[in-house]
Structures are given as structure tokens and as C-alpha cells.
Amino acid sequence: MTHPLLVVEQVHKAYATNPVLRGIDLTLDKHEVVALIGASGSGKSTLLRCVNGLESIDAGRIVLGGTVEVSALDADLDVVRRRVGIVFQSFNLFPHMNVLDNITLAPRKVLGQQRAAAEITARDLLDRFGLADKAFGYPDRLSGGQQQRVAIVRALAMDPELMLFDEITSALDPQLVGEVLDVVRELSESGMTILMATHEMAFARDVAHRVCFLDGGVVLEQGTAEQVFDHPRQDRTRDFLARTRGR
Amino acid sequence: MTPVTPDVGSPYVDPVRRDLMHRKARRDVLVASASLVAFVVVAVVFVSTAPGWPTVQELFFSGESFSASIGEVLSAFWLNVRIFLIAEPAILVLALAIALVRGTSAPVMFPLRVIAAIYTDIFRGIPTILLVLLLGFGVPALNSDGITNEPLVWGTVALVLSYSAYVAEVFRAGIESVHPSQRSAARSLGLSASQTSRYVVLPQAIRRVVPPLLNDFISLQKDTALVSVIGPIEALRQAQIDSSFTFNFTPYVCAALLFIALTVPMTRFADWLNARAAKQRNAGGSA
């Protein structure tokens, strides 16, 4: 019996007196692609930030790989973050470094790789995602779609076991969304374990093995894309889907 | 009449409009020149018709006194330059250390954080000239072995203490101006807090504070003259000595000209950097 890669158990999280997560339960197996959907403010981003240890939780447990308790007060978060990559809505590339340095910084400083080795990995990844000619470009010279693909490559260069995508296409012009989603699709096909918060319902239906609907700080409903999108059991889910129809 | 279609690549400007624009530009230049001439004439007439002008001319702008003292004042000015060159790197290092300490959050660092905060409060609160006097006369009064009584040293130390408190705040503002999402991104890649500071936050922060830092250094160049109150003979002191021998104030004007000669290029450099930074911000404005 192998452990699930990620277990989230009864997680609670409030900002000041405003509760955002109110008892989240979620399990992710290796190679699984799970989409988190739900209205703005339903806690999707907060959950992802908690899994990566960027936010501390108030109650519950988050366990990675069956052994590492991310939520422990004395957890070594640097170790957790080496295994869990995250890509943000706003790219967050380092503006003072070129693309290659953005990608190789963490492998060199955190994993202790030699510059040459790190650059070979980086160039392979850039090549794979159609960014080979951008290696020496600076972030402000790239389109939003290119910046976001570089951000994905930067996270991948750490060879994570789990990738978290936090609404990575929400800040993009519509015509640039496709190129970023193609990258996610390719990653899911290559067996990467992915937990993504998204507003792209069509994409979630297409790629996710499982869809979780977050509402009021809990996972209100989950199942295959077909179950959740075509036969939602909860009224709240039906309402939400009706409001996002056409996406 | 068929509309004129511009060929691709060359911008099209309406010839009537261009003519009007040129005419307006010529008129603007004319008005500016006339205004300048009028201003200069009024100023010159006002000053030169003042009853005391011949006396002022003799006391402050005497060519004879100028050529007699410029050599001595210039060689004394070399001391100002040396004080500046030694104080500046020391200020940068100390200020950055204070800013970094104040930005830490580890519980062990608490005492250092308190010391850094008190340091900034005290040395920013005392007038620099007072600090020069306190150190320059206070430390030699201790009569301690192994500590120099050299006023030049303590004057420079006073400048370093005072300016590093200011510059630390400039650094701190720069560090805080880097968006928290940059820190999140770095930490999420597994970089430690200190690696995040060193490779991600500081390089961006320092680039942003270069113009205000230059401004503080222009100010420091002038404040090297404060060291004169405890004895060292730098440009201002030398000018004072010369003028008290000849009862003529022209040596002060010599000293003023030397300070200007040093600060103006640096001011222009700071302006240029500011303009360049503004241009870059506008160019990279689309996120």
C-alpha cells in the first residue's frame, strides 16, 4: 500500500477574524491532476499557499509523501518547498535576472548544482516548452504568456514531485491563455502530479482527473469532471456552474 | 481633393500643423530668451547700484586675494576629499548592516534589532555638528591608552555615525519597496530567508535606492566641512585662516567654488540616474 502524495485533513485557516478555510479535506495520489474550482474568495489560493508552507494553518494537518508534516510548527519548509513547486497568477519572475538565471538560481543555491549542469537542465526545459530563444532575455521583454511559461520552467527545474498552479492564466490576455494551458496539459500527460486552482472550466474538464468545488471554506463536492460539471449534486455547485457558463 | 496617404514607415504630419508647431516653438524660444535677459539686467542693476557694492566687490571678489589663497585652500580641500572617500564606504557597509538587522524576524536577533533601532533614533536625532563636537572633545578627555586623540579621526567617525543612521533608513525603504510576492516566489523555490535577501531582494532594493543614496553623498561632501570645528585644517578652516590674515572674505568664495566643483558633477550624475530609472519604469510598466 503506497501513501497518497498529499493528504489535507480538516484544515482551518483564518486571516485575522475572517475564516477562509473551514475544515478542508483533500487527498492527492501520485500522477493525479486535481482542479480546484470555486468563486473568488472560496479559499483556493489560500489552500495552495498552505500546502507550500507560504501560509501557516490554524488547525488540521497537511502531510506530504506520507511522512513529512508540512503543517508541523517545526517543519523544515525549505525541504517541503524543494519537493513542491508553485506557480502564481502574477508570474513573479525576478526582474533583475535573465530567464536562464531565473531558472538556475534555486537549483544552484538550494540543490548545490554546478552552473553548467543547471544550465543544461534549464535549456532542455526551455527547449521543451518553445522558449529556447528567450534564455538571455529579461522578464520585462517577454509577453505574459512567455513569462508564465518561464515561471513554470523555473518551478520544474527543481524537479518537484507535486506542482501547484494558482490561477496561472487569470492575469493573461485571452489570446495568451492557450500557450500556458498547453504546457500544463503536457505536464499532466507526462505524469506530473498537479493541484491547480482555475477559472478555466473547459480546461479543467479536459485535463483534470478529479474536480473539487470549494465553497465556504470546505470541499463541498468532488468527483470526476463529468460528475461535477454534468451532474452536480449540490445546489451551490449548480449555481456556481450556471454563473460561469460560457467559459 | 484626394487625401494624402503616407507611405508605410514614414510618419505623416499635416504640413499646416507642422508649420504652426514650428512657429510656436520659435516664439517660445524668443520669450524665454527675452525673459532671461530682462532678469539678468534687473539683477545686475540692483546689485551694482547698491550703496555697498564696491565694498562687497573688494571684500568677496578680490582677484588679488583669490590668486593668493586659492592654492592653499585647494590643498586643504584635498583633506575634505579624503574624509569623504574614507567615510563613504564605511557608511554604506554600516548602513546596510543596520538595515538588514532591522529587517530580520528571528527571535535570537531581538537584541540586535533593538540596538539598531536605538542607534538610528539617536544618531539621526543629534545635529551632525554637535556629534562632531561631542566625539572630538569627549573621546580625548577619556585619556584612554590605545585610543587615538586625533580630531580628524573622531570627526570622520561622527560623520559616519550620523550618515549611516540616515542611509540605513534609505536602504530599509528600498528593501520594503520590493513586492512581497518576490519573496514568496523565492521562498517557494526552497531558497532560505538569507538567500532570498541576498539574491532576490537586495539586488532589486539597491538598484532602487541609488539615486537617493547619491543625494545623501552630495550632502556628505559638503558636511566634511563640519570636521573643521574640532581643529583639522580643511578647506573651510584654511579659508577662515587666510581671511583673518588679510581681512578679506574672498578665500571663503574660493572654498565655495571648490565644493561646487565637486558636487555639481555628482548632482548631474544623480539626475541622470533618476531620469534613466524613470524611463525604465515606464518602459517596463506593462506587467
Image (cartoon, coloured by chain):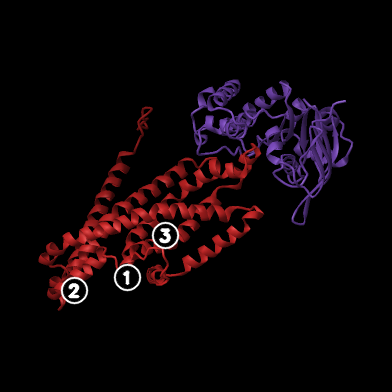
Chain colours: A purple, B red
Vertical placement of residue B196 versus B38, above or below: above
How far apart are the two marked residues, 2 and 3, measured between alpha carbons? 31 Å
Image x and y of residue A41, in percent: 74, 46
Label 1 marks a residue whose chain is: B
Vertical placement of residue B55 versus B20, above or below: below
Image x and y of residue B119, in percent: 52, 63
Q: Disc 1 designates what residue?
A: B229
Q: Is residue B49 in sight in this rendering?
A: no
Which is nearer the N-term, disc 2 or disc 1? 1
B57 with respect to A244 (left or right): left
The quadrant holding residue B101 is bottom right
Nearer the observer, A109 or B144: B144
Image x and y of residue B156, in percent: 37, 61
Q: Disc 2 designates what residue?
A: B244
Question: Do marks 2 and 1 share a chain?
Answer: yes
Query: Residue pushed farthest front?
Result: B145
The quadrant holding residue A126 is top right
How far apart are the two marked residues, 3 and 1, measured between alpha carbons? 16 Å
Q: Amino acid at mark 2?
A: Ser
Q: Disc 3 designates what residue?
A: B160
Q: Which mark is residue B110?
A: none
Name the quadrant of the C terminus of chain B: top right
